[in-house]
Image (tube, rainbow, N blue to C red):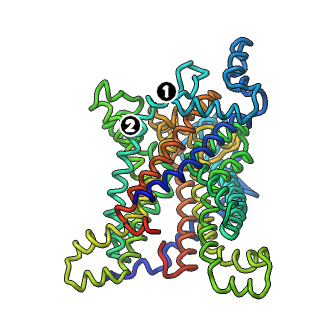
Amino acid sequence: MLSYIAKRLLLAIPTLLLVAVAVFLLIRLIPGDPAQVMLGEGADAASLAALHHDMGLDHPLPVQFAAWFGHALSGDLGHSIVTGEPVASMILQRFQLTAIIVLVAVLLATLIAVVAGLVAAWRRDSIIDLAVVGSASIVLAVPSFWLGLVLLLVFGLKFGWLPVVGYVPFSESAAQAALFLILPIVTLTLTQSGVLTRMMRASSIDVLRQEYITHARAKGLAERVVLSRHVFPNAFAPTLTLVGLSLGHLLGGIAVLETVFTLPGLGRLMVDSILARDYPVVQGCLLFTAFVYVVVNLLIDICYPLLDPRVTTQ
Amino acid sequence: MTGPAIHRLPLNAILGTALVGLLVAAILIGLFWMPYGPIAIDLDHPLAPPSWAHWFGTDQFGRDVLSRAMLGARISTSIALGTVVVAISTGTCVGLITGFLRGWTDRLLMAASDAILAFPGILLALALIAVLGSSRSSIILALSIAYLPSVARVVRSAVLSIREREYIEASRVAGDGTIYIVLRHVLPNALPPVVVLATSLFGWVVLAESALSFLGVGVPPPAPSWGNMLSDARPYMEAANWLSIVPGFCIMGTVLGVNLLGDALRDWLDPRGET
């Protein structure tokens, strides 16, 4: 078990290094002087020279990378060109909101997927199965931002039950903040549940075919027990992997939803800074989201043997 | 144990063919005829609701929504097809090389694909487009880079199991070269999962392109794509809801149709497996 964890940790290091190289090189892909690119058109000569020195542009690329990566490791991601704020604190501030939405939505979507997928597999080819597969397929085909817009139109504008624009931070009023988050969370839960339900259903069907299920039924176990004790633990592992993949991706991927619901999250920060050509922020966000993705999937990999002890022996 | 076999009807094949047929028809008809010019401005009739003159109404500049949706179908589909072709062909090459050769090439290329996969696809594409500039070809390039690793992984895992089969051993014993074996025996056997993946990929790209256009870095206006039509429709959500409903259903119908066809294809290629 320990060697398994150690191996997973070691495998994550080259990935993180390559991620950092990619983020570093992205800015160099833009034609022109990187310092000029970072500071924008209207930069004065003094700050340009200062940044030249900071970025070590007179040194060879590997040295520049080492300096930049060293700063990043110590939590210094540079300063925003637009506001002058430190990038790291901007990211952490925006990250909370996005993390709450993503965590709650993925948790709810997983619950829906496990129940719906298990039942659909158990009653395969029945009306219930058809309904589950059908709604999962539809949900998979709906653009999340469009679903968000439609929900806003119905519950925000038509019925007036929920606020339409803006956001109140949790620190000011938790109840108000929760009201603003209902629609984004519902939208994300719905769009995520499609793919997770399909995965859960497919792996449950596979498990239901196994001989130990026939054996469990032959023992006279109630169907409820067969499903919860034998099918669920075995069928859940692939779904959990998918949960990990979507958790990491959604941190940046919900940028579109944050745009629809005008929420100041991490994805929105990234989109705004791309549009404003605020490259230090872009770099910081990319590095941060990729880092979270690798860490989340590392954690899931480490939890995996708890579900399926065979993994460690491979 | 199982109820009536409703699902056994090739429902997904029928529905999928119907939806994709509708898309293809809209594109083909649009090549020769559209009710109005899709970028023709008519300031006398802005935000006109659906009527006999304008089946799907008009937008804030009086442009006919049906004509724009038809041209949008052509543009969105050509971007999706382009991305699928680029991502599938390069991804298959990478998957074949890494899966069959193993060793350091495999480790290096797989580490690189892990690194790409660590970025949220949409944001990676967004950053690349910001660097490359906003155009249809840079959207295709950016989305191809974002989706290439998934293709390479699927091909690689198929190749890993194929290379252990007896017929590969037999071909090697018979004195065939590596390139011949890969092209003649490995590639054809690795193709079925790739074909199924291509259909899902098409759906993902349609959604991703619409999201990029919605964020304002997709297809540059005045050319319509379903995504930028939705983006334009946002201020008129309440006053002119047909502006948001039409492109939304276009995207949904297209992705649903292609996904259903993909499901039917998978059942047909691999009747036993569900995964």
Q: Is residue A116 above or below residue A218?
A: above
Mark 2 in CB contact with mark 1 (< 8 angstroms): no
Q: Is residue B5 left or right of residue A85?
A: left
Tag nearer the camera, 2 or 1: 1
Looking at the image, which residue is at 37% across and 42% down? A183
Mark 2 and mark 1: Cα distance apart in space: 32 Å
Looking at the image, which residue is at 55% across and 35% down? A285
- The percent coordinates of residue B19 (x first, y second) are 57, 65
Give the amino acid type for the residue marked by disc 2 in the picture: Leu
Q: Is residue B60 above or below residue A233?
A: above
- Give neighbour class at mark 2: few <14, some 14-19, many 20+ (Cα, 10 Å): some
**Chain bearing mark 1:** A
Looking at the image, which residue is at 71% across and 80% down? B185
Q: Which residue is mark 2?
A: A157
Q: Quadrant of the N terminus of chain A?
A: bottom left
Closest to the observer, A301 or A237: A301
- Which numbered circle lies on residue A90? 1
